[in-house]
Amino acid sequence: MALYSEKVMDHFTNPRNVGKLDDADGIGEVGNAKCGDIMKIYIKVRDNIIVDVKFNTFGCGSAIASSSMATEMIKGKPISEALELTNKAVAEALDGLPAHKLHCSVLAEEAIRAAIKDYYDKNGIAYDKAQFPDPHDEEEEHAHNDED
Amino acid sequence: MAKTVYVDNAATTAMSDTAIAAMTPYLKEVYGNPSSLHTVGQVAKEALDDARTKIAAIIGANPKEIYFTSGGSEADNQAIRSAAYAGLAKGKKHIISTAFEHHAVLHTLKKLEKEGFEVTYLDVHSHGNITAQEVEAAIRPDTALVTVMYANNEVGSVLPIREIGEVCRAKKVVFHTDAVQAVGHIPVNVVEDNIDMMSVSAHKFHGPKGVGFLYCRNGVQLKNLIEGGAQERNRRAGTENIAGVSAMAAALKEAVENLDNNMKKEAALRDRLIAGLKKIPHSKLNGDTVNRLPGNVNMCFEGIEGESLLLLLDAKGICASSGSACTSGSLDPSHVLLSLGLPHEVAHGSLRLSLSEYNTEDEIDYIIAEVPKVVEYLRSISPVWESLEKGEKPHLI
Ligand SMILES: Cc1ncc(COP(=O)(O)O)c(C=O)c1O
């Protein structure tokens, strides 16, 4: 199908790291079912390294593929590196996403940040609040189409 | 890839052999322009007249009441604008329609609203239908037009067109119906159904894409959208698509000759499919369950999103469609599903399977076997489903 790159289709049909972690150290959930995508990311942390990561996603092909790719990109990486992951890097690693699907990669970035923040909060680890701006309101960001 | 099971016939159909055979002479030997005086042109003109006569007879019209167009969208645009401006000339600026019309109708109405028309969009209720009484109650002295679709393209509801037409006739209001999903699929007769204007598209009944027609009853004003030559009795300029028109006539003839059998066959397949898919927990059939196109199945599955469902079905060779936002390029699910009052999160998980007489029982059983697996898988990775199952959120369906 020409809508998506082969990479997207690969990560969509064979998603990596799909599932849950019952003993997760941090959980991040972002998105909005009303808008059609929710991502939930679970991380396990040892010595500041993300030793395991899993995701559950409700959403379209690119949302599932973005979750899969993003989790691959942070697995085994120090938290500091995971925090640097951008939506652009996720989209590029997937060989691009259609313009109207770019918000899926944004959600992946936000879900990872939310999971790390949750880990910090649960473990009383101090952090710079500025590093974790509130995930933007999805509904506002993508003003619902007023077809003209 | 597995075999292809095409169940997206409301989007478009495969051309029939009959239609292709009817088309080819006009691509090769009979290439004339029907406006030309010479023999080559006049042969083409005969073909055009012949197609018009055939089509008119099938829908109960006079050949002079058939205007060939580029398809359903153009016919909708022309009919609605014609009636609106004809009304305006008499000081009438009110139009009645429904909330779940095709965009060819809705977007035309939106434009007219910007030009100062007032449009009443009748609620189609959770069951996806309206009554003639509701139309009657909405008619005002300044109502210029009632435009109500014959059958809905997404959820398959068949509307009470004959009764609505009767009300409009009694109240002397022009009545247009978008019959794109009805003609060739269920019995339609413009006289018995009290229709003033009707839009039809060939590619929904195994004809070619890019051709259709507008029926406009003698005496009802029709304005042209496309200026130019005198084709179509001065109402639609442009050298006629004779190959397309001939194929449309042949496809329509074939469709109505087999109408009873096709309807029976499709309805049996449809009911088998619905019965099979209804076994999926937290699923729902959308649209009118009684007055329904014989080929339409539209279901919602809670906790999943339609585009991922479509892609996974496509990988199994099943070609379907969805009203999810992600398939439309907008963030809102289809206006049709929302018009039924479905919550956004439920509408995102919709699946439309639209059948034709080409489908087989084996194909239906294949779909019944595969869809539950895909739904179950997507639910297994869905945080929405998880919170529904844990009772954190109530099931909506
Ligand atoms: C109900 C309805 N009206 C209008 C159209 C537009 O027809 P066409 O594709 O021929 O422009 C369609 C199909 O797309 C339809 O289903």
Image: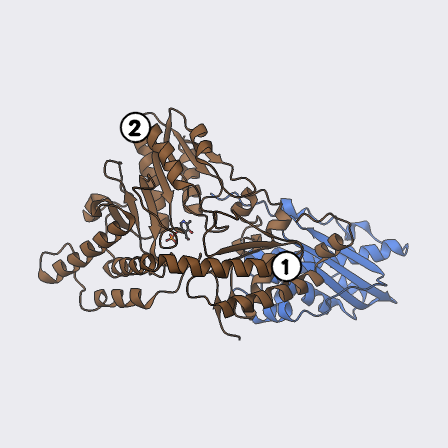
Q: Please name the amino acid that badge 2 sits on.
A: Ala
Which chain's residue wears label 1?
B
Q: Nearer the viewer, mark 2 or mark 1?
A: 1
Residue A67 in view of the camera? yes
Q: How many dots with numbers? A: 2
- Front residue (pair B305, B219): B219
Disc number for residue B279: 1
**Does residue A126 appear anywhere in the picture?**
no
Circles 2 and 1 in contact, beta carbons < 8 Å? no
Is residue B105 rendered to the left or right of residue B29?
right
Residue B158's disc is none
Is the same chain shared between marks 2 and 1?
yes
Residue drawn 32% across and 46% down?
Answer: B189
Picture coordinates of residue B306 (x, y %)? 59, 57
Q: Secondary structure at mark 2?
A: loop
Instruction: Residue B139: name its quadrant.
Output: top left
Image-based side of B374 in relation to A40, left or right: left
Residue found at the far right of this picture: A124
Q: Residues within 10 Å of mark 2 (few under 14, many from 20)?
A: few
> In brown, which chain?
B
- Categorize mark 1 by other alpha carbons within 10 Å: few (<14), some (14-19), many (20+): few
- Shade representing chain A: blue
Mark 2 and mark 1 lie on one chain; the one further toward the N terminus is 2
The percent coordinates of residue B101 (x first, y second) are: 45, 44
> Which kind of residue does numbered mark 1 sit on?
Lys
Instruction: Indicate if the residue with disc 1 has its beta carbon within 8 Å of ligand 1.
Output: no
Image color mode: by chain
Relative image position of residue B377 (x, y in whole percent): 67, 65
Q: Which residue is mark 2?
A: B89
Left or right? Give the position of A29 relative to B238.
Answer: right
Task: Using the image, name the chain to which the residue with label 2 belongs.
Answer: B
